[in-house]
Image (cartoon, rainbow, N blue to C red):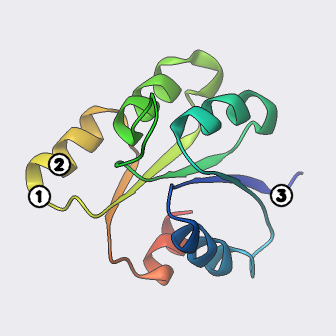
Amino acid sequence: MHAKRILIVDDNKELRALIRMTLELSDYDLFEAQDGDDAMKMIPVVKPDVIILDIMMPGQFDGLELCRKIKSNIANSATKVILLSAMSQKADIDQGYQAGADVYITKPFSPLDLLSHV
């Protein structure tokens, strides 16, 4: 069985590093994308089991749009999407779940909370 593949998608390099540090102690294969456009190119190649996704990102795809695209593609429908966002209003969270997110975590986040959902 292969190690769980995790794609971290966030335009903030420091935050990607923090998420990587949180996860690298476990046996995961970690990949990073700096925005939704980058992630769209990587998903068919990497075939991640879990995608940790920021909502507010530059480029053609923000996190919500990317989540919708991932979940609407039958090849990725089993991929778990964790939205990680500073947008913490109930309406924002509802939008995240409507886009197809499996989990919605607000920033600042607990690394242990993130780990428990991965």
Q: On screen, 59 above or below 80? A: above
SS assignment at label 2: helix
Question: How far across and down, in percent of the image, does residue 33 sit?
Answer: 64, 49
Question: How far across and down, in percent of the image, does residue 24 sit?
Answer: 74, 76
Near mark 3 (Cα within 10 A), the count class, few <14, some 14-19 or many ≥20, is few
- Type of amino acid at the residue the image marks with label 2: Asp
Question: How far across and down, in percent of the image, does residue 5 sit?
Answer: 75, 52
Q: With 44 as the anchor, is 90 left or right in this view?
A: left
At x 75% / y 82%, what residue is drawn?
Answer: 25
Residue corresponding to mark 2: 92
Q: With 44 as the anchor, is 86 left or right in this view?
A: left
Q: On screen, 54 above or below 76? A: below
- Type of amino acid at the residue the image marks with label 1: Gln
Residue corresponding to mark 3: 3
At x 37% / y 77%, what residue is drawn?
Answer: 109
Residue corresponding to mark 1: 89
Near mark 1 (Cα within 10 A), the count class, few <14, some 14-19 or many ≥20, is few
Q: With 94 as the anchor, is 4 left or right in this view?
A: right
Image quadrant where one finds the C terminus = bottom right
- The answer to which quarter of the image holds residue 41 is top right
Q: Give the Cα distance between marks 1 and 3.
A: 34 Å
Q: Choose mark 1 or mark 3, whichever is in front.
A: 1
Q: Give the Cα distance between marks 2 and 1.
A: 5 Å
- Type of amino acid at the residue the image marks with label 3: Ala
Disc 1 vs disc 3: Cβ atoms closer than 8 Å? no
Near mark 2 (Cα within 10 A), the count class, few <14, some 14-19 or many ≥20, is some
